[in-house]
Each structure stands twice: as C-alpha cells, then as structure tokens.
Amino acid sequence: MRKSPATRSTLAFLAQSTLVGLALAFVLTVCAPGLVERLRGVDGNGAEPPVASQAPDSYRDAVLRAGPAVVSIYADKIITERSLRLVPDPVLQRYSAIGYGPPRQRLERSLGSGVIVSDDGYVLTNHHVIAGAEDIQIVMQDGRVTQAEIVGSDADTDLAVLKIDAGACRPCAWTANRKARSATWCWRSATRSDWDRP
C-alpha cells in the first residue's frame, strides 16, 4: 500500500516535531535541572510549594457580621420621552411615516443594594443604581426607611457614595487583613429584594 505524498509529508513533520521536542527536553534536563523542577512546581528539596488556602467551608460568620449593614436602595427618576404616532395624512406619510406626539413623563425605579461603611451614615453602592436619580430611599435590614443624598459618584468605576441619617446606621465591621491577595475568595452581599427581581 503506497502512501500519498501529503500523508508522507505529514508523518515526516510529526516525526521531526516529536524528535525536536524530546531533544529539547533532554537538553533542559541535563543543562538546567532546577528549571525543570520549577516548571513542575517542585522546589530544590523535592517538596511541593505551599498551596493557597482553600475556600471557606461556610460564609455564615461573614453573613452574620456584615448582614445588618447591607441595605436595599430604591432610586426614582422621572424619564421624559416623546411618544411615536403615525401621521394620519396619506400624502404626509409618503415623506414621513413617523410623527412625534407630545412629550410624556414616566417614573423609573432602580433597585440595588449597598453597604453602610461608617458610623456617620456613608453607604457604598454602584453608580448605575443611582445614576440620574431624583429621590433615593434606603431600606435597612430591620425595615426602617430613610432618605439618602448622593455624596459622590463615578461612572468609570461604577461606584457611588451616599449619605443617610447617622442615627439609623449599623456599619459593616472592617478589618485590615494583610493576608488578602489577588485571587483571594470573597463574598458579595445582596439584599433579599435583589434576588427576588425577575
């Protein structure tokens, strides 16, 4: 059985690639044995490097500690839009099939969550939740409702800081954890109403 020239050239390429790979592995093993061990993830003593801590078994303690500081945010804004209607005159429809009616207003409500971060009533949330809002209400975990004012907001980082009445606050407990690194497990808290949304 004769092989076609394309099959022979493919087999020759695979054989050459395998031979070059084996030769390169041999040269690295002889000339730089430490490099091969590091690539395998083993140190010079044959021990494997320490593994990063695993995810916690439960977030229960974090939820109990931070939960009371999580709030629901209702942001209302008035949207003005022009209604579309067809032009009733057939002659005018030829030139413009769509006409604009009088402007109308409607109420749009954004729902999100935030965290009380200080005793004096500062709340951290997302910019997109409160963007353009004229009225912002905060609902605490215990059901109390209070008004909020926008202190600052940044669309690029999607962060916003709100201020509420300091008497109604129970801030989140913060710790300076120096062990936190990139890719460390974290937990995002949300209010129950965030999960109830369609």
Image (cartoon, helix red, strand yellow):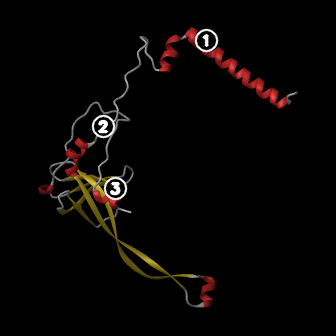
Residue 169: where, in percent of width, then height?
A: 15, 53
**Outermost residue toward the front?**
1
The quarter of the picture where residue 26 lies is top right
Q: Mark 2 and mark 1: span between their CA atoms?
A: 45 Å
- Badge 3 is on which residue? 127
Disc 1, SS: helix
The answer to whether residue 176 is above or below residue 115 is: above
Sequence-first tag of 3 and 1: 1
Task: Name the residue tied to disc 1.
Answer: 27
Give the left or right position of residue 159, taking residue 13 as reference. Answer: left
Q: Nearer the viewer, mark 3 or mark 1?
A: 1
User: Tags 3 and 1 in contact by the CB under 8 Å rule?
Assistant: no
Which is nearer the eye, 98 or 44?
Answer: 44
Residue 96, compared with residue 175, is above or below; it is below
The outermost residue toward the left is 167
The quarter of the image holding the C terminus is: bottom left
Where, by quadrant of the figure, is residue 196 drawn?
bottom left
- Contact? badges 2 and 1 (CB < 8 Å): no
Residue beneath the point at 57% across and 8% down: 30
Q: CA distance from mark 3 to mark 1?
A: 56 Å
Q: Quadrant of the N terminus?
A: top right
**Label 2 Cα neighbours within 10 Å, binned few <14 / some 14-19 / many ≥20:** few
Q: Earlier in the sequence, mark 2 or mark 1?
A: 1
Q: Residues within 10 Å of mark 3 (few under 14, many from 20)?
A: some
Residue drawn 32% across and 69% down? Answer: 77
Which comes before the other along the chain, label 2 or label 3?
2
**Element marked by disc 2:** loop
- Direction right: furthest residue: 2
**What whole-number distance in Å separates the C-alpha atoms at marks 2 and 3?**
32 Å
Rendered location of residue 120, percent (x, y): 15, 51
Q: Which residue is mark 2?
A: 57
* Residue 127: x %, y % from top left: 34, 56
